[in-house]
Amino acid sequence: MAMKTVLFLVLVARSAFSFLPTQESTKHGDFSHQSITERALYESAATFIWKYIDAGTGSTKQTSRSAVNATIEFFRGDRSSEAVFGRVVETIVWGNNKAQEMYANIPMRTMNAELIFAGNLLLQSMREQIIVLSQSPTPDWNNIRKLIGEYLFTLQMFYSNTNWVETHGNLTCSELGIRGRTLMPTAPPNVATCAGCPYSHPQIDKHSCQNNILVNGQYLTSGYLSTQGIPKPTGNNTAGMGKCSHGGKNDAFSAVNPIGGINKETSDSNLSPHFYLHHTAGEAAVDATMKFFVGEVTGLLDQIGPRLFGELIGLPVACKDCLKPGLSLAYVIDTSLSMSTDFEEIKTKVTETIQSALLENKTTPSDFILSTFSDPVSLNTIRNTTDGYEMISWIRNLKQEGGGDCPEYSFGGLLEALKIIKPGSCLFFYSDADPKDSQLERVILQIASQKDIHIAFLVKGTCNSGIPFYDRLENATKATCLKQSLDKGRRKRDANELVIHQPWKKLSSFQNPGQQRDPDSSLLSTLLPASAGVIGLVLVLAVLLRKRQISSEEKQTWTELNDRHHRVSQT
């Protein structure tokens, strides 16, 4: 049974301010907010199904078409699950379209008028709010989905309204909406960003505005739109240069020097001067939307973990209970000196997890296993105990030693734990390096399969070998909910690389599943009050900063003010 397309129409102004809200409101075959969001959700669901529900049946190299078909096929014959997923898609699309209805004239929301820095701060704040609400004891999934739709509205706008696509094609912007990452700078107020272009309809059809942007590769810019209340700065009438217009027949600024525009929201040259890039922008928006859900490290799947993510998108998964009597709880930890960035944090969080298990659960595993490894192999150790507090003492007293080159004797440490672990148990592995003893892979797979061991690789690094040793083991050992995404800071061993570490949370395998609620409550009444102060502060500061050059000290102050206000709004 093919999955029915969600049709959720919202009445909005017909003038275009971004990708249009629904397929029915655009030229045939154009991307809309609805089509972008729906396709990204189907692809994200397929990724989740392949990783956590039907592990091993999919491939990261599957095409988007096969990904959509995989999701449709997954629901074949299961009308109940199909309906649940359909309501999830409908709710997120509703939030997407509601944001279009409410915020189309707010340039920070649409990334117009060069308020890109402000829009990026808004996305950072909303993304963090989505993560916090999802990790609450009783997440209100219905309203979180609506907030996600609102977030995606501005995220998708970036690709239709700025010059990112003109500079980078269909590549996504990995810095957008992620706190701690630096977005490409926006053109200063005194820098001309566009030249005028012949703007009659026949000329536009011949790509007359194709080369009108002056700052590609140097700055981000976006057009001024006459309906949004921010005047377009006066250009140089003699040279025909100045700030860009949004463009299109509904934008009066398209006739103001410099004449023309840059939006890519449709493939209709009457509405979009850069109509020929519409499908490139649409593909980039689909990819960015998908990465928001299931992107490596920064995606929601890695941020909130598979159990909560499954509840969010209507595909709940059964998590492995690692604390049942008769099971072992095993940790395999890299103690080489290269682990200095992660080592103390790993010790702290493993200790907290075991303490929580001992205090909160009436039953605990039958024994605890600690296997450590380094280089040379003589530094590898293996210990086991039935006393959880003795295990905590061992963890606290771990010291770093050995290493030097990147590969470590990690498979040796893993193999020793597998030899003594009880069948059906959980094993958590921490290392930032490839194995030096990769010849043990086959025997490890054999033992793990025979004993039905569930392995989660939490800090999973690489030595640039290009061989996915840990991915192969993880896919073969049914990690499912054991994978603690917040701990999975995948990184390469490179002293010059900036490593962004995500916050730690209790292992999802040890969490008590929360009750799902999905009330039909108001998006505004529930979600917006917490973020309204941040949004107002960002907008005011953004307008002020557009009036003058921003020094690095001023930027830092702005960031600190926003962070402080963000923290206050969450309390």
Image (cartoon, helix red, strand yellow):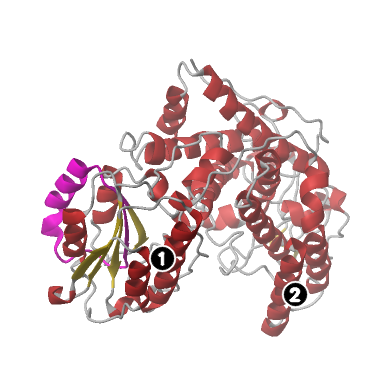
- What residue is rendered at 58% in x and 62% in y? 178
Q: Is residue 234 left or right of residue 145?
A: right
Residue 236 in sight: no
Give whichever of discs 2 and 1 has the lower sequence position: 1
Mark 2 lies on residue:
561
Stretch in magenta: 426-455
SS under mark 1 = helix
On residue 270, the disc is none
Residue 304 in sight: yes
The answer to which quarter of the image holds residue 222 is bottom right
Q: Amino acid at mark 2?
A: Leu
Observer-nearest residue: 353 or 175? 353
* Whole-number angstrom distance, CA of label 2 to CA of label 1: 34 Å
**Residue 281 in the image: x percent, y percent?**
58, 45
Mark 1 lies on residue:
350
38, above or below 171, in the image: above
Q: Is residue 500 left or right of residue 224?
A: left
**Residue 47 in the image: x percent, y percent?**
43, 40
The answer to which quarter of the image holds residue 378 is bottom left
Q: Residues within 10 Å of mark 2 (few under 14, many from 20)?
A: some
The answer to which quarter of the image holds residue 357 is bottom left
**Residue 184 in the image: x percent, y percent?**
59, 67
Q: Give yes or no for residue 533 being in the magenta stretch.
A: no
Q: Give yes or no for residue 443 being in the magenta stretch.
A: yes
